[in-house]
Amino acid sequence: YLISAFSTNGIQFAAIADDPVLLNCIETPEIYDLDARPKNFNSSNNLRRKPGSPNSATGELIHIVGRITDINCLPIQNAVVSIWHANSRGVNHYDKNIEDNQLDPNFAGSGRFVVNNLGYYNFITIAPGKIGDRAPHINFLVQHPDFPEFTTQMFFADHNCDNCADPVLEDFVSNGLASLLIAPFTYNDQVIKTYTFNITLGGLQLFATEMPAMKITISKISPDFKTIVMGLFEDNETVNDGGVLQGKQIIDNIKQFSDFNGSFGEFSSTILPEGKNVVVVGLGKKDEWNENKELNIGGKIYCELNRLKIKKAAILIEGNAVNVAYGAFLRSFKFDKYKTKKDEKITEVEEITVLVKDEQLSNAERSFEHLRQEGESIFLARSFITEPPNILYPESYADHIKKELTKLGLEIEVLDKKQMEEKKMGALLGVAQGSSKEPKLVVIKWNGASKEQKPIAFVGKGITFDTGGVSLKPSRGMESMKYDMAGSAAVVGVMHALAGRKAKVNAIGVVALAENAVGGNAQRPSDVVTSMSGQTIEVLNTDAEGRLILADALWYTQERFSPQFMIDLATLTGL
């Protein structure tokens, strides 16, 4: 059952699979009635000896170890854990009413630790004594930018009699949460008691939207670049560079020593005598050149530059070079933030400069700025789609939509389960009832036109994971069912783009978010549900859940907003 083990500062750490707190990640109870706390915490994790003191504090040496996670059991990296507690005589050094002769001159009183990438912390300290009628305990403060400040107290499993009489711990007995505050112990190799206290923070850890680091700039045609990418159509002998880059000479050179003929996506490269690196890409037949091919060739250029380990390059392409750059920009999206080790061997393009004629410079800059905004909306949608389902579920998804879109002035409204019950959304609720994750309906509003103008509406299916329900899907390929919310992500991306471009239109986005899970309360084939419209629906296959949640979402949108028209986006299968 051992998942992982490691050692730091001589303290053994182990994550055990049958640890109920670590496995289930039940939210740790918060305690606000704490002992007097220090204004400033000692920066060391060793409380047994005050900095500069030659001796150790009086009392039994103990170790405190644990892990800080969110409710998805993911480590909260770089969380700051601070502790403080009484000395072995039960005296809190930060109590203003305590006399100096009651203090232990060698006891630090407090300590601090920044958790590692797996969320683990450790402290070396002494066993605290009782303060009045309180059981021995340790005060904890956990801080992280993505969470509210969290405080609680840890109690000791080998002080059961004291724990039973503790007035603070007593408050958590009736709801069964007291056990989450009591730390079990083992003995390490040096026969020192090591107490394990895992802390699970409630709320939602914010995930960062994946945005490419690649920079796109626009410049007039110039030879002042170490690497230049040129485009050549099949029947052309040269590139249209105004003579600045000696394109004909370069192309002649490449054709003389290779089989390059300019077919679409073909690459060849050469190094000029002055050290300049020239990459030539085939554009195919000129009469077939269009916007889609411009985007496509941009992506191919990005991949070729990566293959050649070129970090910076300029692009000279006949036609709409900005579209080519946009294709490279879109291709630069990656999603690797959950990888423990990044592939350091991969060289990624850092900057691409689009070369245009002087008279095209201003228009090209404006054009790409619009495309960049559109691209960021696409990356937002891609990030949502690619997130794992233990991170992106209805509640967290709704929160992140709100976080990302309110920045652009969009109005966000989130309907919870109770509100959906009041509106009699039986079709949507029926799909969600088998999951422990409650459904959400997110309404996104963009008001870019006059109030009199009816909005257009985009309605998206957001099944954050689809097992098929009781009509269970085959296991093969089920991991891809996290993509069943792609329609909703497209709606979010569209609304983000409209706001980013300040579109002069009124638009509504509605996304229905739920998990289609297998559980004791899951919907069954032959169940009959009543949709918001009053129409009854017999469920013959629980894996046809998309049309059920859309039925309520579409009806809600039509009834509330009376849009000019509705566009629904969904991953639907079957007839």
Image: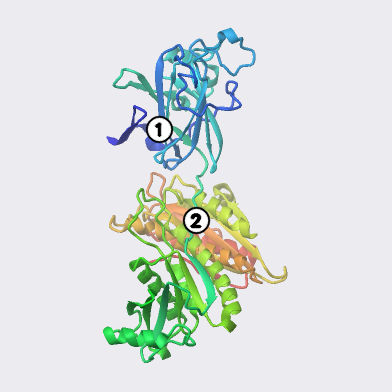
Using the rendered view, name the quadrant where residue 315 is placed. Answer: bottom left
Residue 550 in the image: state x and y as whole percent. 50, 62
Q: Residues within 10 Å of mark 2 (few under 14, many from 20)?
A: some
Structural crowding at the residue carrying mark 1, measured as other residues with C-alpha within 10 Å and reported as few (<14), some (14–19) or many (≥20): some
Q: Is residue 455 above or below residue 252?
A: above
Residue lying furthest front in this view? 274
The one nearer the camera, 507 or 309, is 309
- Is residue 535 visible in the rendered image? The answer is no
User: Tag 1: residue type?
Assistant: Val
Q: Nearer the viewer, residue 448 or 206?
A: 206
Residue 114: image location, x then y, percent: 47, 35
Quadrant in the picture for the C terminus: bottom left
Q: Residue at x 35, y 50 (%)?
A: 341
Where disc 2 sits, the SS reads: loop
Helix, strand or loop under label 1: helix
Which label is found at residue 435? none
User: For residue 499, which quarter of the picture?
Assistant: bottom right
State the residue lying farthest toward the top: 101
- Residue 541 place in picture, x, y as percent: 37, 59
Camera-nearest label, 2 or 1: 2
Quadrant position of residue 526: bottom left
- The image's mark for residue 209 is 2
Query: Relative to 364, is 288 on the left or the right?
Result: left
C-alpha distance separating marks 2 and 1: 29 Å
Residue that badge 1 annotates: 21
Q: Looking at the picture, which amino acid does disc 2 mark?
A: Thr
The colour scheme applied to this rendered structure is rainbow
Could you tell which of marks 2 and 1 lies nearer the N-terminus? 1
- Name the residue at 34% across, 18% down: 192
How many numbered marks have been drawn onto this rendered protein structure? 2
